[in-house]
Image (cartoon, rainbow, N blue to C red):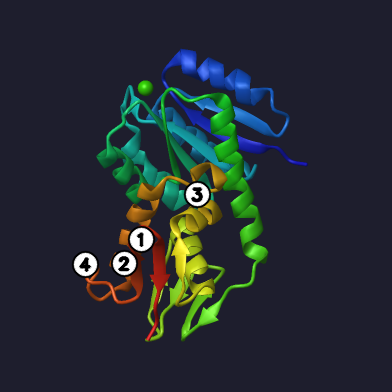
């Protein structure tokens, strides 16, 4: 079986060596290391040219010698729509996390973390990418999901482009149309069991979905908050 290629973008040599050892000895993965944004971009472009297949995972530090990792997330996301982007940062601020997710990151690990936690999260993301295409998509109340391009067609016939996570959330809500879906159920389905208590992830994504789907995102008619429980999708 082909190994999953991982790109680690990290200028702290100590952390880089530590992760190279921890992940590098796992036979399922190969790890490449970039010490700056410029190196990371070069390695991503080189890999594209070599036809070796895209990186499956990019582990991205934010404080890098030639800039902020945050600024390169949209570029990575645009070129590698199926790649798992995980931010590794010492920054704790909620605001930074929100920005990372809004830019297209899939996950955010605050340093210090253990290699076990990193690998477990990475695996959960990769598993989800693998099972998704075979699943049957719901078509409910005139809304349907179009698999190939991750588009949602609404009842009015509008087509909305979704990111992978947005797509997975809407899919869960559509499958349970009209019923409240708990935070835990959504988080487990989309991010994996290690994220079952990260309700702030959901808040960010639900807000983005509302901005894309609702006429007035501040007074949603479709994606309804069930306080203390989760979210419910209502189509009319
Ligand atoms: Ca750094």
Quarter holding residue 166: bottom left
SS assignment at label 2: helix
Number of marks in the rendered image: 4
Inter-mark Cα distance, 4 to 3:
31 Å
Residue situated in front as seen by the camera: 53 or 63: 63
Q: Is residue 34 visible?
A: yes
Is 162 located above or below residue 113 in the figure?
A: below
How packed is label 4: few (under 14 Cα within 10 Å), some, or many (20 or more)?
Answer: few
Where is mark 4, residue-wise? 218
Disc marking residue 80: 3
Query: Which of labels 2 and 3 is toward the front?
Result: 2
x%, y% of residue 42? 47, 34
Task: Determine contact: label 1, label 2, CB under 8 Å.
Answer: yes
| Residue drawn 59% across the image and 28% down it | 116
Where is mark 2, residue-wise? 210
SS assignment at label 4: loop
How packed is label 2: few (under 14 Cα within 10 Å), some, or many (20 or more)?
Answer: some
Task: Determine contact: label 1, label 4, CB under 8 Å.
Answer: no
Q: Does the residue tagged 3 have its C-beta within 8 Å of any atom of ligand 1?
A: no
Where is mark 1, residue-wise? 206
Residue situated in front as seen by the camera: 72 or 108: 108
């Amino acid at each position: 079986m082909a190994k999953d290629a991982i790109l680690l973008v990290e200028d702290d040599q100590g952390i880089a060596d530590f992760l190279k050892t921890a992940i590098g000895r796992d036979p399922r993965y190969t790890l490449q290391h970039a010490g700056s944004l410029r190196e990371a971009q070069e390695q991503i472009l080189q890999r594209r040219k070599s036809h070796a297949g895209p990186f499956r995972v990019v582990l991205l530090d934010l404080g890098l010698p030639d800039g902020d990792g945050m600024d390169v997330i949209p570029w990575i996301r645009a070129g590698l729509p199926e790649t798992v982007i995980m931010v590794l940062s010492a920054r704790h601020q909620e605001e930074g996390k929100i920005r990372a997710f809004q830019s297209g990151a899939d996950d955010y690990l605050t340093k210090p973390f253990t290699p076990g936690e990193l690998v477990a999260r990475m695996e959960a993301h990769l598993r989800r990418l693998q099972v998704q295409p075979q699943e049957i998509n719901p078509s409910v109340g005139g809304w349907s999901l179009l698999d190939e391009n991750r588009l949602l067609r609404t009842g009015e016939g509008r087509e909305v482009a979704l990111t992978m996570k947005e797509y997975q959330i809407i899919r869960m809500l559509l499958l349970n149309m009209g019923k409240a879906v708990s935070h835990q159920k959504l988080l487990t389905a989309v991010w994996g069991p290690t994220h079952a208590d990260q309700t702030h992830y959901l808040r960010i994504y639900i807000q983005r979905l509302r901005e894309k789907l609702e006429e007035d995102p501040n007074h949603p008619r479709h994606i309804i908050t069930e306080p203390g429980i989760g979210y419910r999708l209502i189509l009319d």
